[in-house]
Amino acid sequence: MDITIDLEDYKLNVRAAGVIIHNNKILVHKDVNSDHYALIGGRVEIGEDSEKTVKRELIEEIGKDVEITGYVATIENFFEMKGLKYHEIMFVHKVEFVKDEDKEIQYTLKNIEGKDFLQYEWIDLDKIEEYPLLPKTITKVLKDNKFPVHKINREI
């Protein structure tokens, strides 16, 4: 069960995400029906730590094993989506593919869970400001390249 709690007029989420960087590009996911990108990951399940969440989500979404290689950030994220207000705590880990052949991937990946609306694209770190990557504060975190950090992202 995901850690998502409805409290008054907010949803509280606990999320974990992974940052994979190859050839100065970062792997992100995009819902083809939306106008933004996000880090790969998902909601933490009750009793699960954030590292296990990242590993589980990458296997579920793209079928790739990863290892945690560092810690990037904790982001307190306040935003509104589809008329709902969210208070999200996000743990961001640096990760690497386990298999050497996966480290050579440079193409867009498809979701293997049957979610055809999700795709996984490589975006150029040198042009990261040109992409609508959410939460917005992650762009600065990745550009500054000084980890770990704690950030607060307020969009409401």
Image: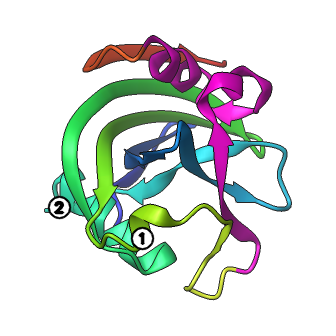
30 left or right, relative to 68: right
Is the C terminus in the top left, top right, bottom left or bottom right quadrant? top right
Q: If you read the primary sequence from the N terminus, does the residue marked by circle 2 or circle 1 appear first?
A: 2
**Mark number displayed over residue 155:** none
Residue 54 x/y as whole percent = 32, 58
At a point 58% along the width and 22% down the height, the residue shown is 139
121 left or right, relative to 130: left
Residue 20 x/y as whole percent = 42, 48
Residue 105 x/y as whole percent = 53, 66
**Mark number displayed over residue 102:** 1
In this rendering, the answer to whether 72 lies above or below 45 is above
Count of residue discs: 2
Residue carrying label 2: 48
> What's the amino acid at mark 1?
Asp
Q: Nearer the viewer, residue 83 or 145?
A: 145
Residue 89 appears anywhere in the view: yes
At a point 31% along the width and 16% down the height, the residue shown is 150
Q: Residues within 10 Å of mark 1 (few under 14, many from 20)?
A: few
Query: In the image, which residues are magenta?
Result: 116-144
Nearest-to-viewer mark from 2 and 1 = 1
Residue 3 x/y as whole percent = 33, 56
Task: Give the quadrant of residue 12.
Answer: top left
